[in-house]
Amino acid sequence: MTSVRILTPDEVPDGLTARAANREGFQAEYPFDSHWIQINGRHIHYIDEGQGPVLLMVHGNPTWSFAWRGLIRNLASDYRVIAIDHLGCGFSEKPQADEYALEAHIGRLVSFVQELDLNQVTLFAHDWGGAIGMGCAGRLPDRFHRFVLMNTAAFRSRSIPLRIAACRVPLFGTLGMRALNLFSVAALRMASEQPLSSAARNGLIAPYNSWANRIAVNEFVHDIPLFQAHRSYATLKAVEYGLEQFRDSPMLLVWGMKDWCFSPEFYDEFCERFPDAERHPIADAGHYVFEDAHDELLTTARTFLQRTA
């Protein structure tokens, strides 16, 4: 049985609140109040700004709710914008335990949506947020209304870039990601076509500053289910099968077409699965489309939200 409880600030361990308060180098970029929920004894951090229709923003790897900061600042004037940090990510707790499979991430998001009693939700999802977010929507279809998906996947694929595959090499990959932080550091350069500001660089990498704090970064990479025997293969298969129920739902696909990870091949498959989706490819943007084309993303999303209200 799942245990879920929204916490007051006084109920959050001092170490977590201190970590969330330390925003040196990116305070102006991420000025939002912290909120906390406890799911099965684990402390999950989230942002909850504004009022109105709910926009639920679900990040990937190696990012966190900081990735959505521009959208949060601009959309909170008209919407209730909620951005969660997955377990092991951002300011959430980072247990050194086997709690990072796709099934566990989806389960926690389901509990989160239910406990906050979110309805008529518009899902914004990027990278792993697609599989986790669409997995949650597939289990709570009556609570989800619209979808804004970008550079992500929610279906099985055997396509994996060589530089991601290298990170999955036993021992070598883990040492690189956890001891040297190679995955998160490389993403600052490889995931964006435009140079990131110092504040963006500081914010994106801040939560992943030690071996222990990089556990989810490592686990996400190893949780990519390429083969049927993988622990998350059946879960991803179920997520994929659940997509059909949203075939007629309002959907916006925004894609950085220079993404070498979730390449245009993934965009094409989403277009095939959702032929009525609004399509907005951005030719000169990379994986971090929210950095490379923030203004265009914001304008496109606002127009979509207003038209499909």
Image (tube, grey):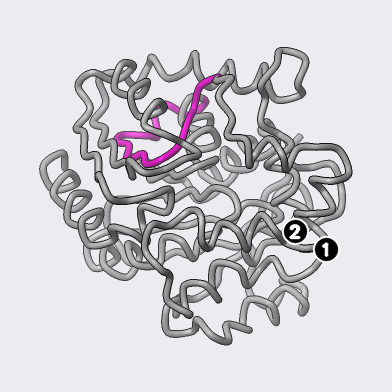
Q: Are marks 2 and 1 in contact (CB under 8 Å)?
A: yes
- Mark number displayed over residue 214: 2
Q: Indicate whether 254 appears above or below 89.
A: above
Residue 174 seen by the camera: yes
**Disc 1 secondary structure class:** loop
The disc labelled 1 sits on which kind of residue? Trp
Task: Write the residue at 74% across / 48% down.
Answer: 218
In the picture, the quarter occupied by the N terminus is top right
Mark pair 2, 1: CA separation: 5 Å
> Within the image, what quadrant is residue 235 found in?
top right
Q: Position of residue 266 (x, y in %)?
A: 41, 27
Q: Position of residue 97 (x, y in %)?
A: 87, 47
Q: Is residue 292 left or right of residue 60?
A: left
Q: Position of residue 191 (x, y in %)?
A: 48, 53
Residue 2 seen by the camera: no
Part of the protein shown in magenta = 139-156
Task: Write the residue at 84% across / 53% down.
Answer: 175
- Farthest residue in the front direction? 162
Q: Indicate whether 286 appears above or below 205.
A: above
**Disc 1: which residue:** 211
Task: Write the residue at 70% across / 82% down.
Answer: 18
Which is more toward the observer, 144 or 21?
Answer: 21
The disc labelled 2 sits on which kind of residue? Arg
- Residue 52 magenta: no
Q: Residues within 10 Å of mark 2 (few under 14, many from 20)?
A: many
